[in-house]
Image: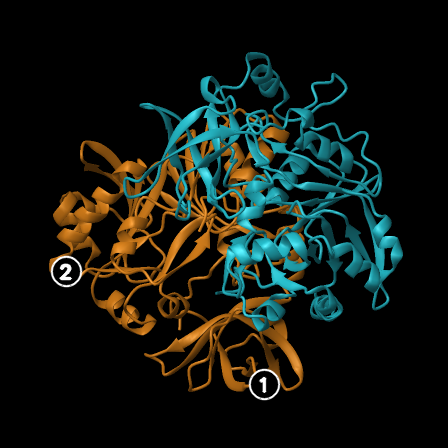
Chain colours: A orange, B cyan
């Protein structure tokens, strides 16, 4: 560990709770596992409540008269209808319509946005465009560190601590809570399908106190430390930038058609290319694959997916689902083979082959 | 490990040789340690030859009629004198003169450059500017994976394998070698002060073969697998982006004055800001600190450096030097205290204080 891979305001807390390892996202630590196995963690997340250090979801703050123009330029999604207090999932693309990131946009004010990003330096992309276009905006990384509270008991826990109004926040909307005389943003969102909230804590020095406040109040709800759970996120059809999608993919391949506007009033980078792809139809699409009866290893390199001798795709994330008693994976699948129940073979390391079929996530 | 943190064409080889851990740079694996201790590795590097998987030094390829205009716009260094076949260390800055990266520029042709980058997505910055300015360039990440051969015996080893012309390549120049009927770029460069080369291998599928070719031929030179050595790089005054410098720093603070042109013929982003800073003089500069007699722990958070009660800087990288029998560290130091031999106290974790003094690297 060096300073280059940044610790978070919560790293001391996760270390005290026995974190077993970290991944790196946006040059920052993301806890990977605690005492519980991935499976134990999965069942716990579906029943109780967890606290996740997701500070690595860095914010790119865009403020200024040209802020909304800059945000719109980066995404094919029409953001003109986005209200203050709303979160919006927005794919970001380049001039070849390749995915640069898939952040959540938070509209704080008409000229004030945050992009809560996946793993790539969107800040540099935004800065580059703003400089090139001479936009009147300020693009910075604010002192904000998201903390996720996920699971069915999240609402009860956070209402207990911060007040009943938390329960009134609708999905993908945000509100405000008071914490030690500071006003903090809280959104009903998070990288799981079990419900929950993300607190966008402003002020690194408050991190340990916020963690402990929630941790202590969470004891009666059987709170555990956690992190995005691979079983739950694959089953839930939550895709991961860098895994299921890279700049080699366009949003239509990922099934993000509903976030791609071709309206004449909307201008964005890559629009002509994306329009052409939409007209011609994509050659492959992201699908689920359910395969094998025994747990597969970790997928760190894409695994070929074949129909007979034809390579029709590649698994980019996979894990054994204890609920389905089979492996669940995500894979681009070629057009002729992407229909449901298509039989496939998955080619794992060490010459292992598992048979399975194509499905549409969520599993 | 997931696909998001990319393996390299050499990862299988370093695993076979007992790599003990990885860091992550540019979303890619960088080996951190092998069997030898950092100190054993240090002495070996100074005497023999090592092979390093530095594929994470990703290339940003910029091709097209506006290529040199784009590169010049990103750096305060005057690149007009850069010849084909030359490497150039170029700080990259934003409009606030904050450092975005500090890559090595390779000029392949008048309209064809590679930027061999440190840990940030320069590709997105370059793309953003190019899109904003409507430049006629293509900005991509080519299929190139640098492999470093470092140490005093590197020249003899590589001349043996690829021919005597390798020895004629001057420092920070590059030439070409033949490997299995492919033409590969080789530069006399690398992230150590012990001399050596970097082969910019084009074609991931050739990686294992290239590694084995060099590994086998290296046996008579006592070759070992390695990676950037923290003792050697701090002693040598090699700075690390993300550690010693971030966007919070300008190139003048890092001592890069000679790479900052204020010539009227040169136009680049952040020039006005940098000019102003140069006129006013910087408030702090990067310095070395030599401190304590017992080995310090790993520096993962900046350690305050004080003179009396005044905080005058913060150590961002440090390690015990077996040669100097003291810890060597790198720190920004405030103007009033940056002169050589200034006495300081370094505040380590767990309330430990070590006394030392300011020096100018290399140590």
Residue B129 placement (x, y as % from top left): 64, 35
Residue A29 placement (x, y as % from top left): 40, 51
Residue highlighted by disc 2: A221
* Number of marks drawn: 2
Between marks 1 and 2 in the image, the one whose residue lies nearer the viewer: 1
In front of the other: B328 or B265? B328
Q: Residue at x 49, y 25 (%)?
A: B341
In front of the other: A57 or B42? B42
Query: What secondary structure is marked by label 2?
Result: helix
Q: Residue at x 20, y 46 (%)?
A: A166
User: How dense is the environment of label 2, judged by Cα within 10 Å: few (below 14), some, or many (20 and up)?
Assistant: some
Which chain is disc 2 placed on?
Answer: A
Give the number of the disc on residue B138. none
Residue A68 placement (x, y as % from top left): 48, 33
Which chain is disc 1 placed on?
Answer: A
Give the number of the disc on residue A351. 1
Q: Is residue B81 above or below residue B57?
A: above
């Amino acid at each position: 560990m060096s300073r280059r891979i940044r610790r978070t305001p919560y790293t001391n807390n996760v270390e005290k709770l026995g974190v077993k390892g970290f991944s790196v996202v946006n040059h920052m630590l993301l806890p990977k596992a605690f005492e519980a196995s991935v499976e134990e963690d999965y069942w716990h997340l579906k029943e109780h409540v967890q606290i996740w250090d997701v500070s690595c979801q860095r914010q790119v703050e865009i403020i200024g008269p040209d802020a909304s123009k800059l945000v719109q330029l980066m995404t094919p999604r029409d953001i003109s209808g986005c209200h203050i207090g709303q979160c919006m999932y927005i794919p970001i693309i380049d001039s070849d319509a390749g995915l640069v990131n898939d952040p959540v946009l938070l509209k704080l004010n008409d000229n004030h946005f945050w992009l809560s990003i996946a793993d790539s330096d969107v800040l540099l992309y935004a800065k580059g465009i703003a400089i090139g276009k001479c936009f009147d905006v300020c693009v910075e990384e604010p002192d904000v560190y998201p903390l996720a509270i996920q699971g069915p008991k999240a609402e009860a826990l956070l209402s207990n601590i911060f007040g009943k109004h938390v329960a009134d926040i609708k999905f993908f909307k945000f509100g405000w809570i008071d914490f030690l005389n500071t006003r903090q943003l809280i959104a009903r969102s998070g990288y799981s399908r079990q419900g929950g909230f993300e607190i966008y804590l402003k002020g690194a020095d408050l991190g340990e106190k916020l963690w402990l406040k929630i941790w202590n109040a969470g004891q009666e709800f059987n709170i555990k430390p956690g992190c995005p759970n691979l079983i739950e996120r694959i089953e839930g059809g939550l895709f991961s930038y860098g895994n299921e999608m890279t700049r080699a993919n366009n949003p239509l391949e990922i099934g993000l058609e509903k976030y791609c506007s071709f309206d004449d009033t909307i201008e964005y980078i890559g629009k002509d290319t994306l329009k052409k792809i939409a007209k011609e139809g994509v050659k492959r699409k992201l699908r689920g694959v359910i395969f094998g009866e025994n747990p597969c290893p970790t997928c760190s390199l894409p695994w070929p997916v074949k129909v007979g001798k034809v390579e029709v795709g590649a698994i980019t994330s996979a894990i054994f689902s204890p609920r389905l008693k089979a492996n669940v994976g995500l894979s681009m699948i070629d057009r002729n083979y992407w229909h449901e129940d298509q039989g496939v073979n998955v080619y794992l390391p060490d010459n292992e082959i598992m048979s399975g079929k194509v499905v549409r996530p969520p599993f």
